Image (cartoon, rainbow, N blue to C red):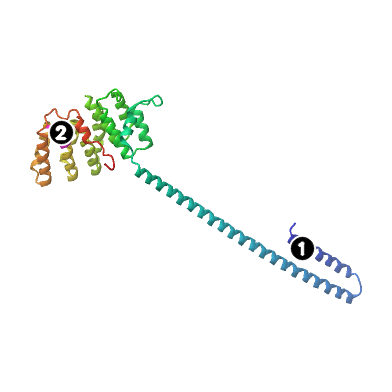
């Protein structure tokens, strides 16, 4: 029981006793004595009530001080925690910056990566495509994509290390457009156009997009194939109402077409737009030097020309 509770009990007991005493006194016949005793009891009760009020006031103040102290303590604790967290964050940021700095100072050895992709050992019997997929799953950086693409082209004449089946696995398992294209180009270099045809058909939906930017991007990707089959997909966009799309279609035809595609461009050579007519004539001049058999298979030089560049080179 608390001090306040005990004190209240005493007051109640005292007051009850006073009432009983007053009742007993009422039985006496001496009114003067009764009055004096009642006055004394009333005075004692008033004193007890005053003391109780003082006790309660002191208790409330003590509780108030305790609550304020607790709030201040909690606030101080939160402030300390915030400072520690800020210090930890700053330390982590510093460590990351140092790690990035170290990485920048120690450039990746692309030749070593290529050797690791091509070689097999007792401790690592993974195929070329499995190593590529693992590497890009861990770090699909532009640098790694460029190194992998170079490695695939380098193995075009070495089916023992990179078989046709491995090229198909790489094409089907990869999501990076450059790696997929290069795998398709190398298989075309070996006389099999199945994957490069898939690459072309995969872009046809974007060529029909209502979004001009999407049509342009599809044309850019098709131009990189350097494959005559892409020229047939490009041809309808030579008449696109969007001037930027039309110009990109001309550039894509220049990169993929051959002599057989010149009739598609001839009407644009006389366009009233000087930019269109100039580029159309440039395309014709380029294509007339290529036989109608040119680019029906991707060549090594065409594949190399479209390899993604290693950042910093």
Q: Residue at x 85, y 65 (%)?
A: 20
Main SS class of the magenta portion in the image:
helix
In which quadrant will I find the N terminus?
Answer: bottom right
Query: Taking 83 as reference, is 172 left or right?
Result: left
Q: Nearer the viewer, residue 124 or 22?
A: 124
In which quadrant will I find the C terminus?
Answer: top left
On the image, numbered disc 2 is attached to which residue? 257
- Point out the tag, 2 or 1, that comes first from the N-terminus: 1
Q: Quadrant of the rendered structure where residue 75 is?
A: bottom right
Q: Position of residue 152 (x, y in %)?
A: 28, 30
Q: Residue at x 91, y 75 (%)?
A: 30
Q: Position of residue 201 (x, y in %)?
A: 24, 32
Query: Taking 155 as reference, is 21 left or right?
Result: right
Q: Residue at x 48, y 53 (%)?
A: 87
Q: Is residue 9 above or below residue 293?
A: below
On the image, numbered disc 1 is attached to which residue? 7
| Mark in front: 2 vs 1 | 2
Q: Residue at x 24, y 25 (%)?
A: 157
The magenta segment: 253-258
Label 2: few (<14), some (14–19) or many (≥20) C-alpha neighbours in 10 Å: many
Q: Nearer the viewer, residue 157 or 244?
A: 157
Q: Residue furthest left?
A: 270
Q: Quadrant of the rendered structure where residue 125 is?
A: top left
Q: Is residue 299 above or below residue 311?
A: above
């Amino acid at each position: 029981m608390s001090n306040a509770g005990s004190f209240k009990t005493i007051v109640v007991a005292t007051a009850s006793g006073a009432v009983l005493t007053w009742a007993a006194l009422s039985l006496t016949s001496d009114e003067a004595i009764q009055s004096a005793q009642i006055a004394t009891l009333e005075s004692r009760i008033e004193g007890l009530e005053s003391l109780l009020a003082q006790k309660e006031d002191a208790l409330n103040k003590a509780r108030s001080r305790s609550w304020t102290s607790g709030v201040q303590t909690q606030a101080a604790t939160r402030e300390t925690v915030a400072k520690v967290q800020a210090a930890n964050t700053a330390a982590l940021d510093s460590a990351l910056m140092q790690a990035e700095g170290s990485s920048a100072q120690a450039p990746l050895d692309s030749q070593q990566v290529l050797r690791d992709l091509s070689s097999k050992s007792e401790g690592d019997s993974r195929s070329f495509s499995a190593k590529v997929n693992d590497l890009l799953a861990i770090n699909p950086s532009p640098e790694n994509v460029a190194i992998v693409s170079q490695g695939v082209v380098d193995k075009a004449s070495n089916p023992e290390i990179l078989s046709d089946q491995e090229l198909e696995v790489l094409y089907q398992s990869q999501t990076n457009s450059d790696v997929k294209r290069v795998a398709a180009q190398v298989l075309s270099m070996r006389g099999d156009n199945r994957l490069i045809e898939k690459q072309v058909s995969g872009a046809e939906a974007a060529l029909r997009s209502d979004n001009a930017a999407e049509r342009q991007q599809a044309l850019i990707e098709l131009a990189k194939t350097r494959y005559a089959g892409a020229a047939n997909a490009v041809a309808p966009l030579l008449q696109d109402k969007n001037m930027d799309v039309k110009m990109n279609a001309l550039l894509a035809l220049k990169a993929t077409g051959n002599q057989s595609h010149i009739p598609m461009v001839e009407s644009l050579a006389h366009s009233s737009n000087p930019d269109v007519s100039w580029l159309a004539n440039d395309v014709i001049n380029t294509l007339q030097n290529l036989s109608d058999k040119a680019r029906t298979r991707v060549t090594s030089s065409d594949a190399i020309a479209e390899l993604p560049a290693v950042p910093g080179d």
